[in-house]
Image (cartoon, rainbow, N blue to C red):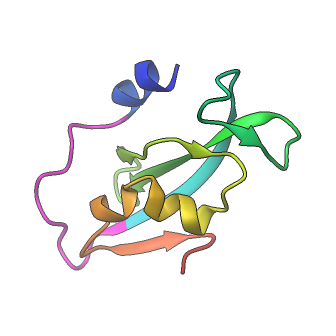
């Protein structure tokens, strides 16, 4: 499901650097899944994956969707493990939790 929907949500991969005045918003969400090879029991008491989504604060368009991480990972770790930290380089990032 993730492999099918993520490309539909995100714009083409970011190949340019963000300008210093670009503001990106990052948030993670728990997505329930039956695939226990990549999921873990999480705070919602289901086997889930943590999906990190990055949007442009100006346009509200999705600019990146991270690789799924086990649902018991907090957003700080999922941010780096999912690879979205690379997409956010050189931009101002707003998130509920970041290191």
Q: Is residue 66 magenta?
A: no
Residue 45 vs residue 23, the one in the foreground: 45
Within the image, what quadrant is residue 51 found in? Answer: top right
Q: Is residue 15 magenta?
A: yes
Residue 21 vertical position relative to residue 27 in the rendered view, above or below: below
Image point (62%, 72%), residue name = 97
Image point (22%, 79%), residue name = 20
Residue 94 vs residue 50, the one in the foreground: 50
Q: Position of residue 53 (x, y in %)?
A: 48, 48
Highlighted magenta segment, given as a residue range: 10-23
Residue 61 vs residue 73, the one in the foreground: 73
Image point (49%, 72%), residue name = 94
Residue 24 vertical position relative to residue 97 in the rendered view, above or below: above
Q: Quadrant of the C terminus?
A: bottom right
Image point (12%, 52%), residue name = 15
| In the image: residue 5, left or right of residue 88 | right
Q: Position of residue 46 (x, y in %)?
A: 83, 34
Residue 19 vertical position relative to residue 82 in the rendered view, above or below: below
| In the image: residue 41, left or right of residue 10 | right
Residue 89 vertical position relative to residue 27 in the rendered view, above or below: below
Magenta span: chief secondary structure: loop
């Amino acid at each position: 499901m993730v492999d099918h929907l993520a490309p539909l949500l995100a714009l083409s991969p970011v190949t340019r650097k963000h300008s210093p005045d670009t503001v990106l918003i990052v948030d993670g969400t728990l997505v329930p899944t039956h695939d226990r090879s990549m999921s873990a029991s999480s705070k919602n008491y289901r086997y889930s994956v943590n999906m990190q989504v990055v949007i442009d604060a100006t346009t509200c368009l999705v600019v990146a969707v991270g690789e799924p991480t086990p649902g018991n990972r907090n957003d700080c770790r999922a941010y780096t493990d999912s690879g979205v930290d690379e997409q956010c380089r050189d931009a101002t990032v707003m998130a509920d939790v970041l290191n």
